[in-house]
Every structure is written in C-alpha cells, then in structure tokens.
Image (cartoon, rainbow, N blue to C red):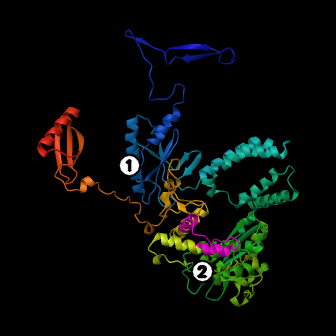
Amino acid sequence: MPHSAAVRKDKETTKVRMVFDASSKVLLNNSYSNTGSCLSGVPQGSVLSPYLYNIYAHDFPQHSTVSTCLFADDSAVLSQGVQLKYTIKTVQHFLDKLETWLTHWRIAINVDKSQAIVFRKWGVIDPPCQLSLFDDNIQWVPVVKYLGLHIDSRLTFKKHIDYLSEKFWGRISLAISLVGRRSPLSLENKVILYKQILCPVITYGSPVWGAAAATHMKKFKYRNVACFVTSSSPVPLKTRRVGQRCTLNLSRAETSSRWCGVVVRRGGASSDKGKDFQLHIFCDASPRVFGAVAYFRYVTANDDSYTSFITAKSRVSPLKKLTLPRLELLGAVLASRILKYLTSKFKFPISKFFLWSDSSIALHWIKEKASNHKQFVSNRVIEIQSNSDPSDWHHCSGRENPADYVSRGANLETIIYRQFWMHGPQWLRTTKNNWPKNLNCDFSSTDPCESEKQVFMFACEFNTASIIHLSKFSSLQKLLRVSSWVLRFVHNIRNRFNKRSDDLSTEEINGAEKFWIQLVQRDAFAEEVNCLRACKLLLKTSVILEFNPFLDSDELIRVGGRLQKSKFSYLQKHPIILPGKWCKFNGVQVTAPLPALRVEQSAPFSVVEIDFEALTQKTRINITLFYFLCAVTRALHLELVNILTTETFLLALRRFISRRGLCSKI
C-alpha cells in the first residue's frame, strides 16, 4: 500500500509518522483500480482483539448440561452430576463438539496447558477415565489456579489461604516502616496505605474462599492488630504483660519435664460386665470466652466411681457485645455439639448423659419451647434440643463448675495439678444423692426482653355485594341509566348544596359505565390491581401479563401494547381489559355480509373472479396459471400460458369465453 512520511514539528518525541494512502489507485495491465466500500473486516487502524473475542464468544459451542466461562484468552468448562462417570462422559462429548468447532475456524488451543479437576466433597476423587482433546490426554490435577484463586478438589481453599498469608506478610514486611507504630506518617495516611497495599490481598475473592477463614485464635490477633493500627501510641502495659505471661507459660510447658508425669485415666473395657458409663459435660461463659469440658464417669460392679477427663473446647466471644445469659447459651450450644460428636465416636453404650450449667436463665430457655423466644435465642435453643434431650440439662453452682477455668482462664500449672480440672468436681465421684439439685425458679416475668412478642390480628368480613344485580338486566343501556340514577342519588346525599335535578347527562352515563368496568376488573383481577397500585411487577402466573397492563387516571386497567407512538386514538392504542365472559365477541372480528352478486341466482361463470399464479420449475421454464372462479357456484376454470403478458392474458380470456360463454361481470 502506498505510504509517505508526515512530519510534525510541534511534537517532541515522534516528529515523523507514517501515513498509508488506502484510497490510492494502482495501475495493473494498463488499467487503474477503482475504490469501493468494504463490507467486511475492521476499520483501518482499529484494534482487532475485541472483534475477534465477540465472534469467539457468540459462536462458541453450547451444550444443555455443560456451562462455559469465556474470557479473552482462557475458558473453562463445567459439568455437574451425581455420577462421576456420567459427568466425565458429558464433558468428553462437549470436547468432541469443541474440537470440530476449533478445526472449522482454525483456532489453535494449547492442550499441554489444559487441566481437568474433579470437585467432590466426599468419596474418591480419582477419575475413572481420561479426557482427550485432539488425541492428547488432558492432565488431571488436585489444585487449579483460576483468576488468581487456588481451587482444590475438596473446596477447602487451604493452599489459597497459605498463598495469601505469604503474600500478605511479605507486603507487611515491606510496608512496616510506613504503617508501623514508629512511622512518622499520620493515621489517615496509614489507613490509606493499608487499604491500597494490604487490604486488596485479603479481600480479593473473599466471597468465594471466605467460608475457610481464620479460627478464633486469629481473632485475638486481629483484634490486637486493629488496636495498634488505629492508635499511634505504644503497646498498652496490660496487653504487654498478658503477652509476656503467655510466652512464659508456653516456654515452661515446652521445657518442663513434669509434663511426662501427667496421666489421663480412661475407663475400663467396654466388654466388662456390671459396669456403667456416664458422660458429663460442663459449660460456662464470660464476656470474653465461652467453652465446655467433658468427663467420663465410670461405675464398677462394687459401686466405686471414677472420673476421667475427655476433651475441652473454647470459643472467643463475638465482636458484637452480648448479654451474659446469651453467652451462657452459646456455651450450652458448644456443649451440645461436643455431646453429639462424642456419641458418634464411642463404640460402647453410654447409659446416661448429664449436661451442667451454672446459668439458670439459659436452662430455662433450653427447657422451654423455642418459638417463645426471639430469633437469636430461638435458633440456638433449636440446635440444643436437636443435639440433646432437655431433660438431661441440670444446674450446678459456679464454684463447682470446672468449665470456669475455660471461661476465666488459668495457668498451665494450675490446670495440670488440680484434680478439679482433671477429674471434675468432688461430688461427681460420689453417689447421685450428693449431686446438686435442680432449681425450681419461676421465670415467667424475669426475662421479658427475650420473649417473643405476641401479635394478635383481628379481621372483620364485610359484605361487598352490589345493590344492583346484573342478572336482572338484559340491556346495557338500561343498566347504565339505572346505575346513573343511583349514583346521582349518592351524589345528592353527599352534596346537599350542589344537588342535581335535571335529566341524565352523557358524563353521568359514562361514569356509570366506568363504575361497572372498575367493579368487574376488581372482581376478576384483584391481585393485578393491587400490584399496579403499588407499582410492582405482576406475577408470572397472571393471565394479563402479556398485555403489559397499566392503570389510567380513572384506575381502569388498559393494554400497554406497542402502539404508543402511533396516530391512533387513545382508546385504540390502549383498550380496556375485561374478562372473557363480559366480552360479546372476545376480539373476533365480525364477518362482513356477502355482496349481492354472490347471493343472487345466476348462470355459472356469469360473474367471474380472475387470479393468476406463476409456476417455476427446475428446467427454468416459466408457466403462468390463470384462475377463473365463479362467484355464485364457486366453480373453477384453469388456463395455462407460457409467459405473463397482456396478449397471452387476452388469448386465455378468449378461450375461456368460447368455452364457458360470455360473462356479465368480471
């Protein structure tokens, strides 16, 4: 293509630019080329990638059981099913279809970089067969990286969280001099740097992998980090002492040899006869932590009782401040979950379950009906009652509750060398007569804030039957006039100083007609009228949804349609919608009467209708067929001609007249 240099002296970087002359003429074989419009392709100098991607996305093969995610240079195929073999077979069928499409459009694909993965919550993940594309097997992988997310086959997002952790702490090490406590920057600048540098690392894709977030120990860490970031002062003395104390306890635990002497005694064998197994779980809560601890109670044939520590769980209190009874209820939820877990793991029968709490209010909620309380309490009571029997819950004092160590905290040495933690309270190893007794407290008026408010709804039924019965009228005009007189009477009663006494007017008759139309529409389309009044969308099951209805100024339902910009009248563009039983013809146009020529008695072919039809065959021979139809007897006469001209038509008409006689009217 001819081109030349364009010099631009006002530019500093690019002074010379190449310009192509697309409209130039080329001399070829003693003749010049002509310019013309290009009906395909893209404009000169434009970007070709968006056009190619639009073609690729709109023409990509589709399958009823396979979903596709298309991007500029990467695409994903997803299929789901109950059986793994059927799912892989569906994907392979789609890949075969895709292979044909790629070959047709000459699009190359890198099979070596293509990967396949099976998402499955339970069961074996190893696929039974291979997927192939262009006779090459696609590699099965346990983890795939897609759009910056590391997705594993179990959807645990463990590898992705590890990757985010390394990336996050790597950026912190680089930005600690700017956002740290010793940084001279202001708090506002620190927050801006945090949002721009650190926050995007954690928030990217968080709706997907957020289900696998941090544990409660990281909540403590994040609380302290938030405290340090939002304050430019040094670490508080109380926080520093707590950290030093925890570090000292952990170092003692690691270096002390006294850990070797700690023995947790379990019960005897389950096959021994004359023995009884009981499970006791204690729960407690504080404003910071709630938890539970479980013990075995083992009774021998000689009525000797032994107790043994099983497990303990703790949780950090929610960031939102809750009342202490609600926190005690959360501890009870944790105790019920421990009960459910232990009963599913034990292989020997347990005769009795005991769950203990020092909160009488929480016990009152558990033993009551869940629907009597507010949503927060009701949801937790439902879970507790599904995991345990409310009759198994008992009350004990706070001093005799070993779960108090979990809620308030204690040193390692205090926990290890106290029988109260390792074996439970002393009365647990005695007979049942020495156990705490349940409290008989009346909580009917002590906790009104957690009770569900009872709402009473009263409804009255009104008889809205009309005083005028439509079945008593056979004429519409009579109905409208009677209704007009009734409406005038109502008007005169309401307006004593502006009464009407003259003859009925056209406005009054039209008002009566609108009244009856409104009454019929309210009766047949009650839900539609309510939706239109509230400016809501109609239900998909509505019978008038296709008409795009709306309410006019008189609150009549009319057809929306597509004739808003036409020159028709308002009634023609937006007719009133009525039920089918109130329409005389139901939209069917009345057939016009036959003309006089068709109903008067006459000879055949005296009144004739003429029409023609052109027939084209594969041999490119054109044949025209003339129809001569009698208007009275409906008899038919046919004439064939080779070409449709005036002369051939006159010849065909002469042949028809010579055979059928002269016509009186054509």
User: Can you see residue 619?
Assistant: no
Image location (x, y in percent) of residue 317: 74, 66
Q: Residues within 10 Å of mark 2 (few under 14, many from 20)?
A: few
In the image, residue 433 sits, relative to residue 161, either above or below, namely below
Q: Main secondary structure of the magenta part?
A: helix
Element under disc 1: helix
Image location (x, y in percent) of residue 91: 42, 50
Q: Residue furthest front?
A: 502
Element under disc 2: loop
Specify the quadrant that holds the C terminus: top left
Give the label on residue 462, or none. 2
Residue appearing at x 49%, y 38% in the figure: 54
Q: Which residues are magenta?
A: 487-514
Query: In which image quadrant can residue 105 be found?
Result: top left
Residue marked by disc 1: 93
Residue 399 falls inside the magenta stretch: no
Q: Residue furthest top?
A: 30
Q: Amino acid at mark 1?
A: His
Relative side of 641 to 214, left or right: left
Q: Residue furthest left?
A: 659
